[in-house]
Image: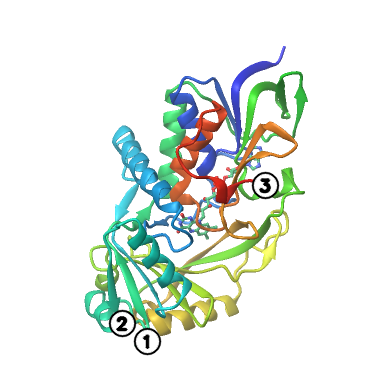
Amino acid sequence: MPVTYDVIVVGLGAMGSATACHSARRGMRVLGLDRFSPPHALGSSHGETRIIREAYFEHPVYVPMVQRAYELWSDLEKESGITLLRETGGVMIGRPDSDLVKGARHSAELHGLRHEMLPAGEVRARFPALHPESDMVAVWEPRAGVLFPDACITAQLAQARRHGAELHYEEPMLRWEVAGDDIRVLTAQGDYRSRQLIVTAGVWISVLFPELPLCIERQVLFWFDSRSGSELFAPECCPVHLWQFDGRRFFYGFPDFGDGVKVAFHHGGDMTTVETMRRAVGDGEVQEIRSAMRRFLPAADGTLRMTAVCMYTNTPDEHFWIDRYPRNPQVLIASACSGHGFKFSSVIGEVLADLAQCKRPRFDLSLFSGR
Ligand SMILES: Cc1cc2nc3c(=O)[nH]c(=O)nc-3n(C[C@H](O)[C@H](O)[C@H](O)COP(=O)(O)OP(=O)(O)OC[C@H]3O[C@@H](n4cnc5c(N)ncnc54)[C@H](O)[C@@H]3O)c2cc1C
């Protein structure tokens, strides 16, 4: 007889580890499956750091969710005794009418968030590593900072296990099917049944559900030695920074946590597939990021230390996908965070546990469902 669970979570990266953690904590019988051994560097959650920010330029509906995510990260830090988040403050820099500056300011004003509007000269004076052009302005928010994704995933998986979740690594779901009132999940090793199936398989959702309108985008991360020594980029002196320039181009960077200054473009990568993504980084790509650094972050333009390649799963409108599968309401799909989902993974795990228990989630999810 197959083993029966309340919920099977497929994919134990950012979203799935949080879902397994919240579901198990509520006493649900949870099975978590992963194709690899998370945390790993083959999906969308590697590269040492992720930005968390509250004045959300993408849409103000994200603000209450990110505020809950902050609470959950803090609870998890206390439970696990591991540092998961470092608040460095953050600046969103661009022309005053750019989506980034306008949107961040709108969210901050609408939700009464602590923030300041800074002219370019003030940004340079406060944060000498950053060189905005004279017609740029910044929204500064004090609560923005950095999450450490490997530690976050590890802590969530440990809590899931502590609360009784069964976690199987190196055991991908091969297929699922309806079996009476249950969903049956098949792997090479087992045959499992569950009331609910939650698929948080990141980029592999595009393989498991090819009919969904999702695109995979290749993204390169770069770490550079700073030219001037590391003081300007120390976390005490340098906030996380996000730039919109030349119309709709986005660039972002982190302080130096000891491995160099990490920078990347946000979007603008090649469209690809999980199977065919190019992992090598070309010289042209290094030159392109250097030219953005010379413009906005000149002191970071030292020796290239390392690169990493990662994938975004994009929806057409770049908002998340958190919804029941239209062909079967016992199947929930969550991911496709279009390059900005990590910070929310703690709260998305909580939301998915609510949905698995047929509880009304406390957030407005209409932007993420019913497409
Ligand atoms: C370069 C880059 C920078 C980013 N920067 C930020 C940022 O600064 N801030 C932010 O908030 N977000 C950021 N994001 C977005 C964020 O990191 C992602 O949205 C998030 O990590 C995705 O989590 P996930 O759980 O959907 O996917 P993953 O963490 O990749 O997890 C998916 C898991 O599913 C498993 N799996 C796949 N198929 C199967 C199967 N058949 N059976 C079992 N398991 C399976 C995989 O092994 C994997 O462990 C960034 C993303 C990238 C790529």
Amino acid found under the numbered disc labelled 2: Ala
The tag on residue 120 is 2
Helix, strand or loop under label 3: helix
Mark 2 and mark 1 in contact (Cβ < 8 Å)? yes
> Residue under circle 1?
135
Q: Is residue 280 above or below residue 332?
A: below
Residue located 62% across and 43% down the image:
201
Query: What is the C-alpha distance between the residues marked 3 and 1?
Result: 42 Å
| Horizontal and vertical percent position of residue 316 | 65, 60
Packing grade of label 3 (10 A; few <14, some 14-19, many >=20) is many
Say which mark, if any, is on residue 204: 3
- Quarter occupied by residue 258: bottom left
Mark yes or no: residue 126 visible.
Answer: yes
Pointer 2 or 3: first along the chain? 2
Q: Earlier in the sequence, mark 3 or mark 1?
A: 1
Residue 86 % position (x, y): 30, 53
Secondary-structure class at tag 2: helix
Residue 39 visible, this angle: no
Q: Residues within 10 Å of mark 1 (few under 14, many from 20)?
A: few
Indicate yes or no: mark 3 CB to ligand 1 under 8 Å.
yes
268 up-or-down from 84: above or below: below
Residue type at the position of mark 3 = Trp
Hey, what amino acid is under mark 1?
Asp
Label 2, label 3: how many angstroms apart (C-alpha)? 42 Å
Q: Position of residue 99 (x, y in %)?
A: 47, 71
Would residue 274 appear left or right of 129 to someone viewing this image?
Answer: right
Point out which mark residue 17 bears. none
